[in-house]
Image (tube, helix red, strand yellow):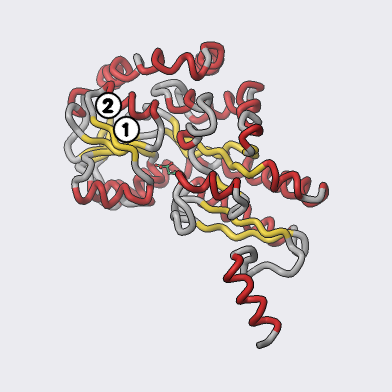
Amino acid sequence: VTAAATAVALCLTTGSALAACDDGEVVIKFSHVTNSDKHPKGIAASLLEKRVNEEMNGKACMEVFPNSTLYNDDKVLEALLQGDVQLAAPSLSKFEKFTKQYRIFDLPFMFKNVDAVDAFQGSENGQALKDSMQKRGLQGLAFWHNGMKQMSANKPLISPEDANGLKFRVQSSDVLVAQMEAIGGSPQKMAFSEVYGALQQGVVDGQENTWSNIYGKKFFEVQDGVTETNHGILDYLVVTSVDWLDSLDADVRDQFLTIMEEVTATRNAEAIAVNAAAKQSIIDAGGEIRTLSEEQRAAWVEAMKPVWEQFAGDVGQDMIDAAQAINA
Ligand code: LMR
């Protein structure tokens, strides 16, 4: 048996190294759940991978596993803590087991657009959220934008009453459960990878997501149409484990964090455009998109906004006030 064959065998059994890695390089596995192209997170992850592999060659190597090929979001944070992967970027809705503070991002109509989310995340309050799970072993590195969420179902959704009695897939967030209950829907938490099949088979009637997710996973093909509600935000935390970050040599850590910061700035600036392109692709593919008049949208605000009261205690009224001041 050659040394190379032994190394490959070792690789396969321990899963500790990647094909592209040389001896002595820090291995960085990044697991996520979306498409790798035409998607804000997918594109950002690929750019990060490219830059780390080019600029840190000899020191570190990265491989991205998109499309839930390695882990679903409900497993990936545990995998991170166990050292099976080193990076993940779940949506902010997926951190409930670790903190209730992130619930602010799920509250419907909390942020008027992605720019408001960006300003909040960049504020002292937002920055503190990245460090808020250190005691649980998780370190937030960056917020990555996706965009505003839209509603879809197997029938037209114009008024919130249209959602009455419909089953909706939601991410694993109690705020989103409450939001769907507020419009008379019946929410079901479900992994992202299962949504298309569940919509197709009628396990659920509808869902909410961004244009890039609705396009990337073809949800529009198994829905009557998508209503442009812009009722909430779907954003990400790029997260690692405190232990892993601490284990890096200072120069490796600094270079890695600098690349992370630059990729974040570059790609966050493009997130709105990526979602606009996905929306256009849905139209081009024959998908039905419905827009709401100001009055019609106001009815959704009125139906959903009472949810804030239920979660103000978890989130903190000061945080809500800070977010609202940014909207103004
Ligand atoms: C979802 O589960 O719908 C999203 O969090 C998926 C994603 O990563 O955008």
**Percent x, y for residue 151?**
30, 34
- Mark 1, ligand 1, within 8 Å: the answer is no
Label 2 secondary element? loop
Q: CA distance from mark 2 to mark 1?
A: 7 Å
**Which labelled disc corresponds to residue 292?**
2
Looking at the picture, does residue 253 appear above or below residue 156?
A: below
Q: Are marks 2 and 1 in contact (CB under 8 Å)?
A: yes
**Percent x, y for residue 228?**
32, 32
**Percent x, y for residue 242?**
68, 41
Left or right: where 51 falls relative to 267: right
- Mark 2, ligand 1, within 8 Å: the answer is no
Label 1 secondary element? strand
Looking at the picture, does residue 193 appear above or below residue 235?
A: below
Are there few (<14), some (14-19), or many (20+) residues within 10 Å of tag 2?
some
Quadrant for ligand 1 reads top left
**Which labelled disc corresponds to residue 80?**
none
Left or right: where 276 falls relative to 168: right
Q: Tell me which corner region of the image, top left, top right, bottom left or bottom right, holds residue 13.
A: bottom right
Mark 2 / mark 1, whichever is N-terminal: 1
* Of the pair 218 and 251, the residue shown nearer to us: 251
**Percent x, y for residue 142?**
62, 38
Q: Is residue 26 visible to the viewer in this orientation of the structure?
A: yes
Q: Tell me which corner region of the image, top left, top right, bottom left or bottom right, holds residue 237.
A: top right
Amino acid found under the numbered disc labelled 1:
Glu
Amino acid found under the numbered disc labelled 2:
Leu
Q: Is residue 47 visible to the viewer in this orientation of the structure?
A: no
Q: Residue drawn 29% across and 50% down?
A: 196
Q: Tell me which corner region of the image, top left, top right, bottom left or bottom right, holds residue 21.
A: bottom right
Name the residue tied to disc 1.
Answer: 228
Q: Residue drawn 71% across and 45% down?
A: 245
